[in-house]
Amino acid sequence: MAQTSLQVPGLAVAASPPAVELRGATKVYASEPAVAAVDLSVQPGEFFSILGPSGCGKTTLLRAIAGFETLTAGEIRIGGQVANDLPAYRRPVNTVFQSYALFNHLTVAENIAFGLRIARRPKVEVSERVQAALASVRLDSFATRYPNQLSGGQRQRVALARALINRPTVLLLDEPLGALDLKLRKEMQVELSRLHQELGLTFIMVTHDQEEALSLSERIAVLRAGRIEQIGTPSEIYERPQTAFVADFIGDTNLFVGEIETQDDSTLVVRTAAGLPVRARGVLSGVTGAIVSIRPEKIALSFVSPPPADNCFAGHLRHAMYLGTHVQAVV
């Protein structure tokens, strides 16, 4: 028998609060702001990435959410509750570090069980939850091994299992794949995506790897010098960057500075410094200058003169490099 929900006219149904919310988050070290007035909201069950170059403040933000750093100003809310004064051990979050932070003198199972034993959980419960955690990261047969007997990818899985066994509301990932080689990194990206889908937890990941953020995240915050440049889905960040920094930082691109000649409801024509009239998507008001971003994969080269068309220009091929999946050309 199908169930129906009853709604009372005029009575609004309260929406779930964000899993994590930052309001004006600011952290200052010796008069220099590492993070400046950051506002962002992460929804329950979302895979959210904070992406930016080294020194942009992304790890400071993550440590503040975890409770390892105290904000100079602003507010942190976890599950709708202000968490500024909560110590790290009382916050419903767990952190996976790039260095794994495993105990070398403990077995895999003992590492995973560490938090539960500190909390004095019953032995039967600890055993059951350790087995479930091992199964979730596909390390069932590795329970009695020690960290120095594992590969980098296996150690990262142990660190994930140890964080997940405490059933956090939010899992914080501090550049979790940074210490792995390319092949292992690709494998662990698949594992992280699988775990997120299966567990339905909120994941917040800090990374400087653009491909990693684009492939794993539902939304991304791009950080620069402690401030948010743009928040959006991977496709929004890549296809519709709001600043030249975002366009240049996310993937490869060609940036052309120029003056706006004409524009209509959806496109504009920018005359570049080289004198080329480039038609681009977008509408700008109150400005005369613009920066046009053209991704390399959007460019097609032809050695035969095509019919006249928008964004079709003649040039000289200066250099070409074969890279396997594509050819990199300088024109």
Image (cartoon, rainbow, N blue to C red):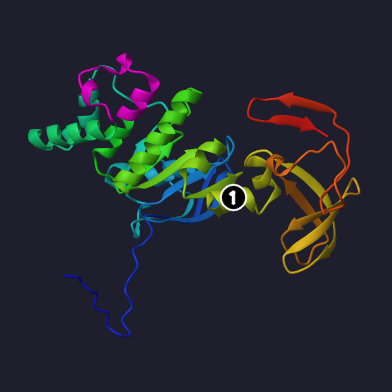
Q: Is residue 53 visible?
A: yes
Q: Quadrant of the C terminus?
A: top right
In front of the other: 106 or 13: 13
Three-letter amino acid code at the position of disc 1: Ile
Question: Which residue is the extreme one toward the right?
Answer: 275
94 to the left or right of 265: left
Residue at (25, 44) in percent of width and height: 167
* Magenta-colored stretch includes residue 155: yes
Kindly state the secondary structure of the residue where label 1 is placed. Answer: helix
306 to the left or right of 188: right
Within 10 Å of the Cα at label 1, are there few (<14), some (14-19), or many (20+) other Cα atoms? Answer: many
**276 above or below 80?**
above
Residue at (58, 53) in percent of width and height: 236
201 to the left or right of 51: left
Residue at (30, 18) in percent of width and height: 147
Residue labelled with disc 1: 237
* Magenta-colored stretch includes residue 210: no
User: Picture quarter containing residue 139?
Assistant: top left
Across and down, in percent, residue 36 comes to 56, 50
Q: Read off the magenta span.
A: 138-158
User: Picture quarter containing residue 19?
Assistant: bottom left
Question: Which residue is the extreme one toward the bottom?
Answer: 9
Across and down, in percent, residue 233 comes to 53, 52
Q: Is residue 59 visible?
A: no
Across and down, in percent, residue 52 comes to 57, 41
273 to the left or right of 193: right
Q: Tally the marks.
A: 1
- Give the main secondary structure, helix, strand or loop, of the magenta stretch: helix
Residue at (36, 40) in percent of width and height: 194
